[in-house]
Image (cartoon, helix red, strand yellow):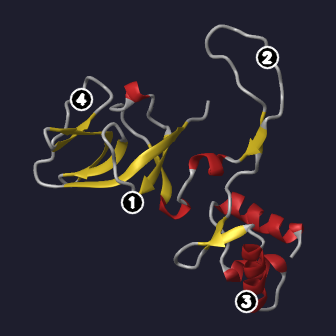
């Protein structure tokens, strides 16, 4: 397995926003059989470059390359800046705990405006996590989907917007918490 082969697979991922199938790996590498692609994938999994999800599909081990952490910046009064390499990390290792339960959703609407979540932002959410009071959740309420703060008032679950224009939501028939918001992603 060469870095060139890994590079081809990751270039495919960048272009198509998904990992290649075994047939596509076979064509990318110029292999004559899917077995060769299978062996390459297993070698890459053993080396920790990629991994397989619960259904056996290959997924990237990390979505981003390590970025240098150069220290801190003062958000209050200005202070002398010193650039010092303190560490490196990927956004994946910083943001994602359970890859198989994590996904992104694009935000529409302004009900979470005062929480700093704007239309067009992406939210990174984790399925299967039990919400705590104050968590922002993705919920199906009476057959409609929404993103709100999770609250319990006198034992009753209430979903609260972060915008005064919207009243709290108390489920009439059904409430399913699909995921808990872990991070907000915004490009400037």
**Marks 1 and 2 close (CB-CB < 8 Å):** no
Residue at mark 4 to residue at mark 1: CA–CA distance: 27 Å
In front here: 154 or 59? 154
Residue at mark 1 to residue at mark 2: CA–CA distance: 42 Å
Q: Which residue is drawn at 16% across and 55% down?
A: 174
**Marks 2 and 4 close (CB-CB < 8 Å):** no
Quarter of the image holding residue 159? top left
Residue sitting at the far top: 77
**Marks 3 and 1 close (CB-CB < 8 Å):** no
Crowdedness of circle 1 by 10 Å Cα count: few (<14), some, many (20+)?
Answer: few
Left or right placement of residue 44 versus residue 151 in this view:
right
Secondary element type, mark 3 = helix
Could you tell me if residue 68 is visible in this image?
no
Mark found first going from the N terminus, 4 or 3: 3
Residue placed under numbered mark 1 in the picture:
128
Q: Which residue is drawn at 72% across and 85% down?
A: 38
Residue at mark 4 to residue at mark 3: CA–CA distance: 55 Å
Mark found first going from the N terminus, 4 or 1: 1
Residue at mark 3 to residue at mark 2: CA–CA distance: 54 Å
Quarter of the image holding residue 35? bottom right
Residue placed under numbered mark 2 in the picture:
81
Mark found first going from the N terminus, 2 or 4: 2
Mark found first going from the N terminus, 1 or 2: 2
Nearer the camera: disc 3 or disc 2: 2
Quarter of the image holding residue 31? bottom right
């Amino acid at each position: 397995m060469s870095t060139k082969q890994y590079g081809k697979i990751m270039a495919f991922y960048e272009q198509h926003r998904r990992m290649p199938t075994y047939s596509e790996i076979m064509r990318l590498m110029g292999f004559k059989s899917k077995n060769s692609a299978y062996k390459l994938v297993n070698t890459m999994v053993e080396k920790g470059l990629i991994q397989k999800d619960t259904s056996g599909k290959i997924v990237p081990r990390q979505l981003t390359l390590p970025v240098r952490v150069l220290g801190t910046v003062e958000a209050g009064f200005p202070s002398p800046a010193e650039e010092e390499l303190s560490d490196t990390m990927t956004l994946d290792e910083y943001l994602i705990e359970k890859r198989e339960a994590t996904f992104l959703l694009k935000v529409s609407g302004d009900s979470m405006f005062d929480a700093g979540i704007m239309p067009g932002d992406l939210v990174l959410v984790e399925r299967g996590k039990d919400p705590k009071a104050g968590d922002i959740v993705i919920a199906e309420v009476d057959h409609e989907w929404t993103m709100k703060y999770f609250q319990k008032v006198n034992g009753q679950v209430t979903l609260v917007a972060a915008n005064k224009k919207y009243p709290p939501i108390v489920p009439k028939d059904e409430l399913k918490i699909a995921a808990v918001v872990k991070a907000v992603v915004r490009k400037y």
